[in-house]
Amino acid sequence: MESFAGRLAVVTGGGTGMGRELVVQLAAEGASVATCDLNADTMAETVRLAEKEAPAGRRITTHECDVSVESEVERFRDEVVAQHETDHINLLFNNAGIAGGGSFITGPRAVWDQTFAVCWGGVYNCSRAFVPLLVASDQGYVVNTSSVNGFWASLGAGMPHTAYSAAKFAVKGFTEALIEDFRVNAPHVKAAVVMPGHIGTDIVLNSRRLLLGADPADMSDEQLDTIKADMARRGMPVEQLSAGDLRQIIQMMGESFRDNAPLSAAQAATIILDGVRAGKWRILVGDDAHFLDEAVRANPEGAYDHRTGGPALSTITGG
Ligand SMILES: NC(=O)c1ccc[n+]([C@@H]2O[C@H](COP(=O)([O-])OP(=O)(O)OC[C@H]3O[C@@H](n4cnc5c(N)ncnc54)[C@H](O)[C@@H]3O)[C@@H](O)[C@H]2O)c1
């Protein structure tokens, strides 16, 4: 798809981060956009930013929707059809995601299940709801955001990352399989999988808030104890820390993930949209993503052997 002008795009998770920047940049290029998120306030800010850039005549609509709940996604789809007065869409960006569900062995099952339900279930539900509208268009593209954790299921030594990685591998496998399905059954539709490395967004803070229901300042003693135990398992010297110290450190870790990334969310969105314009099916975002991709392919057996210098994302990103 060489141009987005006059096209209709659906973007999930458009309240912050890469989703917001996709909405802003698509609107600037003359697309109409329907975006969903859990948070109406952050979506309103996205619309304010996008409308500054959008040429006249483009519509940007917002829809409160939890992508992990199929009935909410179906309502979102029905709202898009009604509000944009359309029987098709051209672009579907399955971007919404949260990070969590580290350990399958010691972590709470509810957190594991919710992470998987958003990161994989969200892509599945939105594809079920919106792919028929892509097929109904003259030209369509589904763009599914996986991660480097969609081909390397680790954050490095001592940091299990099971739910997120399982979901992101599922997103990558599903998208790759869709390529042939579209080629056979809907050749005017394409699929792309996006695999970002470390991008400067609030995903760490947003995910903790969504999974625990609290910002660091409001976390219960029990929640702080769980996080403290996790930090101790990673070898961090947390024994002497007070609850106040811990709250500050948790907040700082989230901010540091956002502020010390090699790429911003806006830069990432530009790389994603350039990839779509070029007709790519695999879009790696960032030098760290390219490095990891090459490292895992060069030595797959060594990918998880941290003693011999397996590709440690944490050493590349500080994350
Ligand atoms: N930031 C990174 O380093 C990075 C790296 C690789 C992949 N990713 C992936 O990129 C995508 C975007 O992440 P981001 O970094 O911009 O994070 P972000 O937290 O800034 O944005 C994610 C958005 O999704 C929304 N969201 C979360 N759960 C939702 C749900 N159930 N229904 C609807 N909306 C929901 C959040 O409210 C938020 O606005 C995610 O899929 C993430 O896994 C991010």
Image: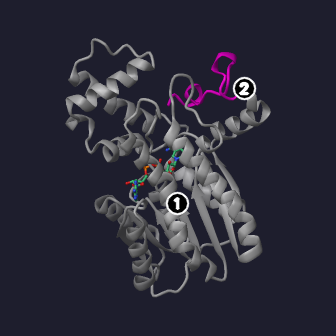
Residue drawn at (27%, 45%) of the image: 213
Q: Nearer the viewer, residue 101 or 274?
A: 101
Instruction: Residue 316: tell me if it is visible.
Output: yes
Residue drawn at (73%, 76%) of the image: 185
Residue drawn at (35%, 41%) of the image: 208
Instruction: Residue 28: tell me if it is visible.
Output: no
Residue drawn at (64%, 52%) of the image: 172
- Report x, y in % for residue 263: 55, 42
Q: Nearer the viewer, residue 218 or 41?
A: 218
Residue identified by numbered label 1: 123
- Report x, y in % for residue 168: 57, 48
- Report x, y in % for residue 280: 72, 60
Q: Dividing the image into 4 quarters, which one contains the N terminus?
A: bottom right
Question: How packed is label 1: few (under 14 Cα within 10 Å), some, or many (20 or more)?
Answer: many
Magenta region includes residue 52: no
| 256 sits to left or right of 310 | left
| 60 sits to left or right of 161 | left
Amino acid of disc 1: Val
- Report x, y in % for residue 48: 35, 66
Amino acid of disc 2: Gly
Q: Quadrant of residue 292?
A: top right
Question: How packed is label 2: few (under 14 Cα within 10 Å), some, or many (20 or more)?
Answer: some
Q: Secondary structure at mark 2?
A: helix
Q: Nearer the viewer, residue 56 or 159?
A: 159
